[in-house]
Amino acid sequence: MEDRLIIRGIEFDSRLWVGTGKYKDFEETARAVEASGADVVTVAVRRVNITDRNSPNLLDHLDTKRYKILPNTAGCYTVEDALRYSRLAREAGVSDMIKLEVIGDEKTLFPDTIGLLRATEVLAKEGFIVFPYTNDDPIMAKRLEDAGAAAVMPLGAPIGSGLGLRNPYNIKIILEAARVPIIVDAGVGTASDATIAMELGCDAVLINTAIAGAKDPIAMAAAMKHAVVAGRLAYKAGRIPRRLYATASSPLDGMLA
Amino acid sequence: MGDDGWQSSLSTGKRGFFSAAMKLRINGEDYESERETLSALLEELKVIPGRVAVEVNLKVVRRADYPNLVLKEGDVVEIVNFVGGGQGKPSARRFDC
């Protein structure tokens, strides 16, 4: 049976989701997205440049039929702003999906989870498919799920930090309790971090900086693609338990006396 | 502006014969237009409605309502689209571990 991620009836071809920020140019963005094999790409909502209408647009470089565009509320520090950006994003006509961020602090970019919960409630009632970016807090993950989140996106580490999963045990606890998909959002630094997230049983991983900021973003995008597939396969295969002492894998029978 | 109110109304969507340009605030900047409706304003700005979302005085406007929305002096208009972005606001702060 095919191991496909489905959220609210939407089928996803890849368990790697990628952001489109911090790239050198749109061409590099498009090539990295292609190499990653992702079918979800996140975008931000910003003012149109009305003085220079010839300025290029990201969506001219991405096939919107091929990729699912996931708008985010990045940069929003209040519930009101997050709601405003979400409603604008929906009206721009790409989808009802929103990656909801209510940021609490500029230095850490940690989420303001109280505001996040409020915004999730409101948007879920308005029919949005809400993906809230939250802490690795099992209780808050559950509260967001109860508030109507379509999936919960706990951070592995601060956005752009590349520190990997700082608390894999909390992610594990979140996964044990969850009835909605869990997607690690932020913190991945290199391929093995993505694999660890998937081996824990996460449903997908969202990566931006680790790819865009790599020396060779296209090569790193490919590495992440394989890392996510490997982690998922290992999770499904079921790893051996950790043991303190050796267990021989070659037979002892037939050894020379 | 020393406007005498005698503006041409040759092109479509412009305001009435005696009306002057009205002052708007678009994406945080002052802007003067004689266009009467939101559709006409977007046309003047060469903004294609397909990929943008528009807010007038903090209310999101449905695309179907663009032709019917009559602009008034002092209206605050926001026109947004999608740009590259992943998570948070890219931080200027960097550190190595």
Image: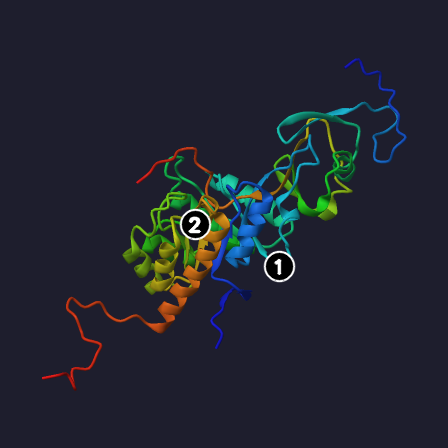
Q: Is residue A238 visible?
A: yes
The residues bearing labels 2 and 1 have C-alpha atoms spaced at a distance of 24 Å
Q: Which residue is mark 1?
A: A66
| Residue type, mark 1 in image | Arg
Q: Nearer the viewer, residue A112 or B94?
A: B94
Q: Which residue is mark 2?
A: A133
Q: Nearer the viewer, residue A3 or B22?
A: A3
Left/right of residue A36 with respect to residue A192 in the rendered view: right
Q: Quadrant of residue A47?
A: top right
Q: Could you say whether the residue bearing mark 2 is in a helix, strand or loop?
A: strand
Question: Which residue does the image show at 84% across and 19% down from the upper left?
Answer: B5
In the displayed structure, does residue A42 sit left or right of residue A167?
right
* Front position among marks 2 and 1: 1
Residue A35 coordinates in the image, percent (x, y): 53, 56
Q: Residue A168 sits in which quadrant?
A: bottom left
Furthest toward the front, the residue is: A256
Q: Earlier in the sequence, mark 2 or mark 1?
A: 1
Residue at 16% in and 86% down: A254
